[in-house]
Structures are given as structure tokens and as C-alpha cells.
Image (cartoon, grey):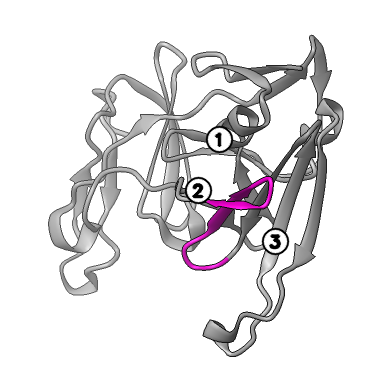
Amino acid sequence: MRSNGTLWQWNYNAEAAAKPFQISNAQSITEVWGTTGTFGLAQRKDGALLGWGEGFYGGLAAGSGTVTNDESLAALPVQAPLKFTVNGQPVTFYGTSGVIGGKLYVPYTSVFKALGVKAVMSQSNPDPKYNNYRFTVWSFVYGNTTVQIKAADPEQLFINGKKSEQAVTLYRLSDTTLFPLEDLTRLLGISLDWNKATGEARLNN
């Protein structure tokens, strides 16, 4: 961090020509936190938290390209901490939730129990197209509606046993699988109001 509040980083990916470059969109910086160069966090004078990174090992990625080629990393606002309420009651859970591609994602051991949604993991029948491989199938049952996601490539969506052409995406992390909460609540007929500014997701059934 320079005395004028701008943010700079060394280009460690080009060892023969390592040099500092400026992280764009980062002015009036008062505090900086970082790791070994793959991502960092900074706070602006107005209190806003910014993040930037190269996307290695699932880390925060912002900007385009790589530092080695075009030094185009940009700091972006960090999403406010996510808070969940079901029918006005706060819900906490052990697990990873997050915003991926602008969508809200949660693990299956999260808000579904409080909503009365039965979430179950099972295996598909042997698929002859894939040498009789059995895929993981996630089922979400609410009232008279059953939504199933077959973890094939790409994922396949079934509504009450009928295959849907609607695209759905799961994200697999090292310790969990994340599900698109907005897509699932819409398919199950559950109301979801997500305030992106405050991070609060209000669910009602």
C-alpha cells in the first residue's frame, strides 16, 4: 500500500522479471491482508472490503487474464456475510454457502430442513452409456413436488420423475457440494427474497 492509498502487488509468476504492478479499482486503501500472492483483501477508507486474486486452489478470482501475461487484476467488493431466515426465524448451519456467478449457493445440510424440505442423496441405476457407472442423485422433496439433480456431466434435472431441459449447475468443493438455492426454491414453490446489499436471504413457505 503506497502513501497515496493505491494498492500494488509483485508479479512473482515471472521470476526473471519480477516487478510491482497496481491492482486496479483499489484507491483510498487503509488496510491490507494477503496470502502468498494468490489472493488478497483490502479495506477502503469508507470501510468497504475489497478482494482480488488469481483464482488458484479455489481462491478469490477477480479481473481477467493472468498476472504473468497482462497484470490485469482488479479489486472487487467482497459480498456481505450471508444470513438466512426461514419464516422470520434465523437459521444457522455448519457448511459452506456462497455467491457463485451471481447466484446464491448452499449445501444440502442447510436451510432445507428448516423449510421442511427432505434432502436425500442416492445413486442412479447403472448407466450403460458410461460403462454402467452410478451417478450421485440429489433429491429435494417438498409437498407434492420432487426435484432431482443427477450429478452427470452436465447435470440433469428431473421434476416429479420427468427430465427437464432446464440447465442446473452444482459446484463441488473439497468437502461439500453446493446447490443453487434460487433455482430449487422456485421449482419447489418456496418464496426467496435475497438482499444482495445486506447478504440476508429470507425464505418463506
Q: Quadrant of residue 171?
A: bottom right
Q: What's under tag 2, amino acid-wise? A: Val
Q: What's under tag 1, amino acid-wise? A: Asp
State how far apart marks 3 and 2 are (Cα): 13 Å
Label 3 vs 1, first from the N-terminus: 3
Q: Residue at x 29, y 35 (%)?
A: 7
Q: Residue at x 19, y 47 (%)?
A: 72
Label 3 vs 2, first from the N-terminus: 3
Q: Residue at x 85, y 34 (%)?
A: 113
State how far apart marks 3 and 1 are (Cα): 17 Å
Q: Is residue 181 magenta?
A: no
Q: Do the CB atoms of the residues marked 3 and 1 lie less than 8 Å apart? A: no
Q: What label sits on residue 183 in the rendered view? A: 1
Q: Which residues are magenta?
A: 152-163
Q: Do the CB atoms of the residues marked 2 and 1 lie less than 8 Å apart? A: yes
For residue 47, above or below residue 82 = above
- The answer to whether residue 118 of the structure is visible from this angle is yes
Locate the C terminus and report the quarter of the image it occupies. top right
Q: What's under tag 3, amino acid-wise? A: Val
Q: Quadrant of residue 43?
A: top left
- 62 sits to left or right of 195: left
Which residue, given by chain and number where applicable, does mark 2 sit on? 168
Is disc 3 surrounded by few (<14), some (14 to 19) or many (20+) residues within 10 Å?
A: some
Label 2 vs 1, first from the N-terminus: 2
Which residue, given by chain and number where applicable, does mark 3 sit on? 137
- The answer to whether residue 175 of the structure is visible from this angle is no
Q: Quadrant of residue 86?
A: top right
